[in-house]
Image (cartoon, helix red, strand yellow):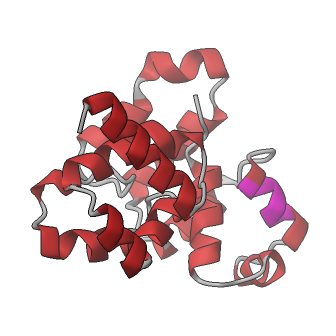
Amino acid sequence: MAKLIAPRLLRHRKKVKLTQDEFGQKYSVSGPAVFKFEKGYVIPSLKLWVKMAADMGIPVKTAVLMHVHDKLPEEQKEVTGIAAMIDAEGESPLGRDNFKKLKKAELREAVANHQWLPEGLRDFAADVEQWSLYSPTGEEVNILRDIFGPLGEGKARDFCDGLRLVREFRGA
């Protein structure tokens, strides 16, 4: 099961357009330490993670649960159901919004500006021409997020290809 903290740190740092050294200075840690956090080699201390999470808009309770999850051995992570609990609480910004509920006019902007979606999916939405060409539905965005998102950040073209695959499998 994937780590919860590492990809969010990477995504947030890129969103605020800071280098690893600059991001580290903000929290009194080195650039190489930030690299290790983002790769999941090392988990920040709980005190440091709560500060970082607060800057990302993650509630303290959710941040603590994420920290516990990432500290557990792999075989124990699924047993606890922490990742599911975080999503079920409805207070976690883990990218589980239901885009199917959005109107077509709101969808592209919501996806492009959603900080917890994979970067490639957000880039796809930010490219007005590509988005208009493919014109994905909210349901298709949910599928792209849930199926292809866990594979990594990806590129915009990867999500275009994913959308074509989804449509092919669905016979659309």
Residue 37 forms part of the magenta stretch: yes
Q: Position of residue 99 (x, y in %)?
A: 21, 56
Residue 5 forms part of the magenta stretch: no
* 26 over 51 or under it: above or below: below
Q: In this orientation, does residue 115 appear?
A: no
The quadrant in which residue 89 appears is: top left
The quadrant in which residue 45 appears is: bottom right
Q: Magenta residues: mostly which secondary structure? A: helix
13 left or right of 66 in image: right
Classify the position of the C terminus by image quarter. Answer: top left
28 left or right of 166 in image: right
Front position in the image: 42 or 152: 152
Q: In this orientation, does residue 7 appear?
A: yes
Front position in the image: 49 or 162: 162
**Mark count:** 0
The quadrant in which residue 15 appears is: bottom right
Identity of the residue drawn at 43% across and 36% down = 147
Identity of the residue drawn at 79% across and 75% down = 20
Q: Position of residue 64 (x, y in %)?
A: 49, 48
Q: Position of residue 13 (x, y in %)?
A: 64, 74
The segment highlighted magenta reads 33-38
92 left or right of 172 in image: right
Q: Position of residue 88 (x, y in %)?
A: 25, 39
2 left or right of 28 in image: left
Front position in the image: 113 or 91: 113
Classify the position of the N terminus by image quarter. Answer: top right
Identity of the residue drawn at 53% across and 63% down = 156
Identity of the residue drawn at 65% across and 84% down = 17
* 162 over 19 or under it: above or below: above
